[in-house]
Image (tube, grey):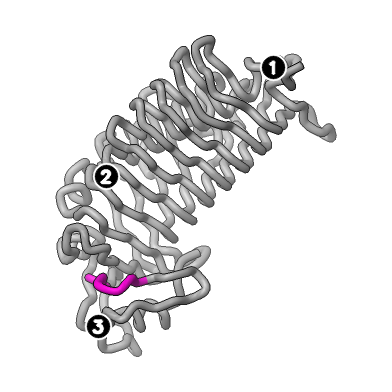
Amino acid sequence: MGISLQDAQQIGSNAGLRTQYGVILPPGARVAAYVRSTGLQSGDDAFVATNLVSSVALGLARCRAGMGDFVVCLPGHAESVVDGTTFSNALQAGSRIIGVGRGSNMPTITFSTAAGAQWLVNKADVLIAGMKFVVGFVGINSCFNITGADFAFYNNEFTTGVFSLGVATVVMTLSAGADRADISANIWRAPSNVAAGDGILVNGAIDSLRVCDNEMIFPATGANGLLRFAAAATNFKILRNTMFNSQAASVACIVFGAVAATGQTAYNNIQVLSTGAMVSGTTGITVGATMTGNFYQNFVANDPRTSGLLLPTADT
């Protein structure tokens, strides 16, 4: 995923540009920096060379708050998050971090060296797209903690890596303030023997969350699932996700705790590894007693070579 290098070079002007991805650079915004950890390369465009920095934090420091400025991470870029401040302190409201590249040359950020390695997104209107994220340390508390409104996380790849089984370990936490977050069209993956405590944890009473069109195939604590609501979120939309909790004996992919969460969960395909019977509301999709959201056409399977069951069961 990402934008082409040619497009990235062209959007240095403030005129705006429309491509197959939509308006990449709205009028008034600018490319604040290009990021490549390996520095200048032969053949780099003059605009790239003039505005090249070695880290995302240095790029973010060049953004103007609220202007929608872009930090463009170039193919082959690699760096690490080692604490909870480096990225967060440089972040500006409205910043857009865009990765250029695909597959092995996607810009890669690794969460490493300490349990506190975290990207705290505490500013509004931040967008991250086209990036690859990797967990490189056992016991990260939460790779992302989102507290800013209107956060967007699109078309990224996330390798949940060497997560321990500890329940305090979370891939992404959506905390109070993260209203209207949109987590869409991402790929989440990991080896089957390294389980997260939680995948995406909704830990605040946020409004209008969207989790749509993701491919989520990784192990998480069997009963916590890949997406868990631990707070009374409202007006959420969980749509068209493909989810497989590959943890041994897993029973859940989407979990609603005993919280008065409201919204819609629809058209998701879900797989768990429980050897027991599929039970409406308790297997694949776990529903707490006080949850008042609605469900449409979600299919859950735990047996090979069979089609999934419609769960929770249809209203009769």
Looking at the rendered structure, the kind of residue marked 3 is Ala
Residue wearing tag 3: 49
Question: Which sits earlier in the primary sequence, circle 3 or circle 2?
Answer: 3
Looking at the rendered structure, the kind of residue marked 1 is Ser
Q: Main secondary structure of the magenta part?
A: loop
Residue wearing tag 2: 121
Q: Is residue 219 magenta?
A: no
Query: SS of the residue at dot 2?
Result: strand
Expressed as whole percent of the image width and height from the top left, the position of residue 78 reads: 34, 61
Figure quadrant of residue 308? top right
The dot on residue 243 is none
Residue displayed at 27% across by 44% down: 121
The dot on residue 280 is 1
Question: Which sits earlier in the primary sequence, circle 1 or circle 3?
Answer: 3
**Mark 1 or mark 3, which is nearer to you?**
1
Mark 2: give few (<14), some (14-19) or many (20+) Cα within 10 Å: many
Residue displayed at 35% across by 89% down: 43
Looking at the rendered structure, the kind of residue marked 2 is Val
Residue displayed at 25% across by 66% down: 69
Query: SS of the residue at dot 3?
Result: helix
Q: Real-space Cα distance between discs 1 and 3?
A: 58 Å
Expressed as whole percent of the image width and height from the top left, the position of residue 122 reads: 23, 42
Query: SS of the residue at dot 1?
Result: loop
Q: Residue furthest front?
A: 316
Residue displayed at 29% across by 30% down: 176
Expressed as whole percent of the image width and height from the top left, the position of residue 30 reads: 25, 73
